[in-house]
Amino acid sequence: MFSKGQLIFAALFVIAFTILMIWSYRKDIKIHKKHYKNSFIVIIAVFLIIAIFTLITFSLH
């Protein structure tokens, strides 16, 4: 399916991407705390809407 080189590249890419994302987030943590104070409310709302749509879909079948 995938060659050994492709798998090695994918693994290294995932590791490098994860490290860079963590570094970037750590660098901007003060800005995140200032501008995104109540962002968890949005996350909860999104999951709640998905759950409601799922319940409606399963109840109609």
Image (cartoon, rainbow, N blue to C red):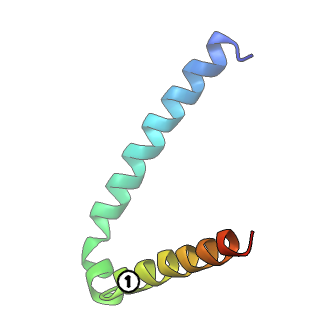
Q: Which quarter of the rendered picture does the N terminus lie within?
A: top right
Q: Which quarter of the rendered picture does the C terminus lie within?
A: bottom right
Type of residue at label 1?
A: Ser
Mark 1: secondary structure: helix
Q: Quadrant of residue 31?
A: bottom left
Q: Quadrant of residue 43?
A: bottom left
Q: Is residue 2 above or below residue 12?
A: above
Question: Which residue has dot 1 on it?
Answer: 39
- At a point 34% along the width and 53% down the height, the residue shown is 22
Q: Position of residue 23 (x, y in %)?
A: 33, 54
Q: Is residue 9 left or right of residue 26?
A: right
Q: Is residue 46 above or below residue 35?
A: above
- At a point 51% along the width and 79% down the height, the residue shown is 46
Q: Is residue 34 above or below residue 58?
A: below
- At a point 28% along the width and 88% down the height, the residue shown is 34
- At a point 69% along the width and 73% down the height, the residue shown is 57
Choose between 22 and 57: the one closer to the eye. Answer: 57
Q: How many marks?
A: 1
Q: Quadrant of residue 7?
A: top right
